[in-house]
Image: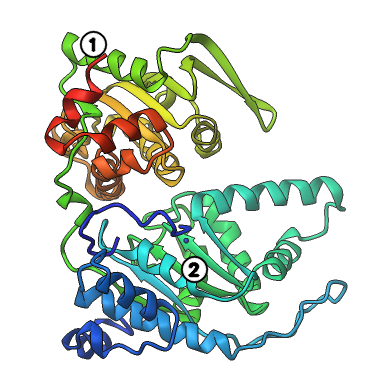
């Protein structure tokens, strides 16, 4: 996120180095007053700096300047219409998009969102990449049920997506699954042919996408096209601003003790306003069901083992986040490489909760920075371990933000928000943990 006085994102934002780092170096010597103010992301950035909501940061400012140039290009770009019924769309030379990569918490998503909100068109879309791929696979399945077996769903789906949104902003672009990789290599090509302009954030340079993946050589053309159609820019100032949060509300508890269990129960009761608890309820969606061990007034309670050691995926977690504004997650263990499947599910769960701004209350065996070791029985896990540790770092950064006082006050649980807002930071802990 941008280097903010408070580390939480501006609530009005909707959520979705340099031509190499050296091209942005000259921008780093400028001040915010030197930026162009003729509209777009730069205007919003300057306004927020002047209002005191952001601290002027040279690295982030360089990205905002590049996004503003794309914004100006889009103002004069008129794509031809996409007419259904023709097999081959006219190849469109669209403005080159932006692929913003860097370490966690450095401002990638907030700069992209600044760009998204400034674009004066309805033909745009901002979506978390996990959710987008779930939608794409659902579209493919529907196509195959309603068309002949020999028909190719990808060009049709690409044109439908392009017709709905000529500008697409992806948040957290990552490829870890062979099914996603094989679809993306053709889908993105077809979307670019239709003139879609893409802006995306990622923790990895395109060259590191789908690293060590099965049949990765088949995915390489997709990486090449990404680099051709999007300028790859690094936003990595070396500081994770989410971790600078100083106002911490007591919603994470470690280690696991009787006192911890009592505190969790107290927060659950307060968050649900002591409402009657439903035991073993059920969420039904997409032809499947998810058992909810305990729930009351928009608050759900799960054991870690309920959600992360069983066969759950993104669709389950997204539905959970849609249905409940607060989630209590108890008994989160320290995870090693032997537990990497559970760790992956935990990371996916945190992503879903974060995107939906769910208030998370959690008890864990260790502090969040020590929850994943990346080791097999005390030994480093090599390339696979490095991949898991990298993904877990993003989750840790998000967890740090999710325990902040501002996250709770701007969250969807009115009771916790009201109490956290009313109390000083020094006394928030006591309020949340007291019946």
Name which quarter of the figure residue 28 lies in.
bottom left
Q: Position of residue 324 (x, y in %)?
A: 49, 29
- Alpha carbon distance from label 2 to label 1: 43 Å
Q: From the viewer's perspective, is residue 339 above or below residue 393?
A: above
Q: Residue at x 73, y 46 (%)?
A: 141
Question: Which quarter of the rendered picture does the C terminus lie within?
Answer: top left
Classify mark 2: residues with Cα within 10 Å, few (<14), some (14-19) or many (20+): some
Question: Regarding mark 1 in the picture, which secondary structure is present there?
Answer: helix
Q: From the viewer's perspective, is residue 363 above or below residue 148?
A: above
Of 122 and 282, nearer the camera is: 122
Label total for image = 2
Position of 295 with respect to 76 (left or right) is left
Q: Position of residue 184 (x, y in %)?
A: 57, 61
Query: In the rendering, which numbered label is found on residue 178?
Result: none
What residue occupies the far front of the structure in this picture?
422
Q: Position of residue 251 (x, y in %)?
A: 25, 29
Q: Which residue is mark 2?
A: 117
Dot placed on the residue nearer the N-terminal end, 2 or 1: 2
Position of 413 with respect to 166 (left or right) is left
Q: Residue at x 77, y 61 (%)?
A: 152
Position of 69 with respect to 107 (left or right) is right
Q: Is residue 260 visible?
A: yes
Question: Which quarter of the rendered picture does the N terminus lie within?
Answer: bottom left
Of 283 and 287, nearer the camera is: 283
Q: Which residue is mark 1?
A: 262
Q: Residue at x 52, y 89 (%)?
A: 73
Classify mark 1: residues with Cα within 10 Å, few (<14), some (14-19) or many (20+): few
Name which quarter of the figure residue 370 lies in.
top left
Q: Residue at x 30, y 46 (%)?
A: 398
Q: From the viewer's perspective, is residue 424 above or below residue 59?
A: above
Question: Regarding mark 2 in the picture, which secondary structure is present there?
Answer: helix
């Amino acid at each position: 996120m941008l280097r903010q006085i408070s580390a939480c994102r501006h609530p009005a934002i909707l959520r979705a180095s340099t031509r190499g780092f050296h091209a942005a170096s000259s921008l780093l010597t400028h001040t915010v007053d030197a930026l162009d103010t003729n509209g777009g992301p730069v205007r919003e950035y300057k306004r927020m700096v002047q209002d005191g909501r952001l601290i002027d940061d040279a690295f982030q400012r360089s990205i905002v300047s590049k996004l503003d140039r794309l914004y100006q290009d889009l103002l004069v770009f008129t794509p031809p219409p996409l007419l259904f019924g023709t097999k081959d769309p006219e190849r469109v030379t669209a403005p080159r998009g932006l692929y913003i990569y860097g370490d966690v918490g450095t401002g990638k998503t907030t700069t992209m969102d600044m760009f998204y909100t400034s674009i004066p068109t309805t033909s745009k879309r901002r979506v978390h990449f996990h959710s987008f791929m779930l939608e794409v696979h659902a579209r493919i399945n529907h196509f195959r049920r309603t068309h002949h077996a020999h028909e190719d769903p990808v060009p049709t789906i690409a044109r439908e997506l392009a017709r709905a949104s000529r500008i697409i902003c992806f948040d957290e672009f990552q490829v870890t699954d062979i099914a996603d990789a094989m679809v993306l290599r053709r889908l993105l090509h077809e979307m670019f042919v239709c003139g879609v302009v893409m802006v995306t954030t990622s923790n990895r340079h395109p060259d590191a996408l789908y690293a060590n993946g099965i049949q990765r050589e088949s995915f390489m053309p997709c990486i090449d096209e990404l680099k051709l159609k999007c300028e790859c820019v690094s936003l990595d100032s070396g500081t994770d601003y989410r971790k600078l949060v100083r106002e911490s509300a007591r919603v994470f508890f470690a280690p696991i003790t009787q006192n911890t269990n009592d505190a969790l129960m107290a927060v659950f009761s307060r968050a649900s306003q002591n409402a009657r608890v439903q035991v073993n309820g059920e969420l039904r969606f997409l032809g499947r069901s998810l058992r909810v061990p305990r729930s009351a007034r928009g608050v759900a309670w799960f054991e870690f083992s309920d959600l992360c050691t069983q066969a759950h995926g993104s669709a389950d977690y997204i539905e959970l986040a849609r249905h409940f504004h607060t989630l209590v997650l108890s008994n989160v263990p320290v995870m090693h490489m032997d537990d990497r499947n559970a760790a992956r599910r935990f990371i996916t769960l945190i992503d879903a909760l974060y995107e939906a701004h769910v208030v998370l209350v959690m008890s864990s065996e260790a502090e969040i920075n020590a929850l994943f070791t990346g080791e097999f029985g005390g030994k480093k896990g090599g390339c696979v371990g490095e991949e898991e540790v990298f993904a877990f770092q993003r989750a840790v950064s998000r967890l740090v933000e999710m325990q902040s006082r501002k996250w709770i006050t701007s969250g969807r649980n009115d009771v916790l928000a009201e109490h956290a807002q009313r109390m000083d930071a020094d006394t928030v802990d006591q309020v949340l943990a007291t019946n």
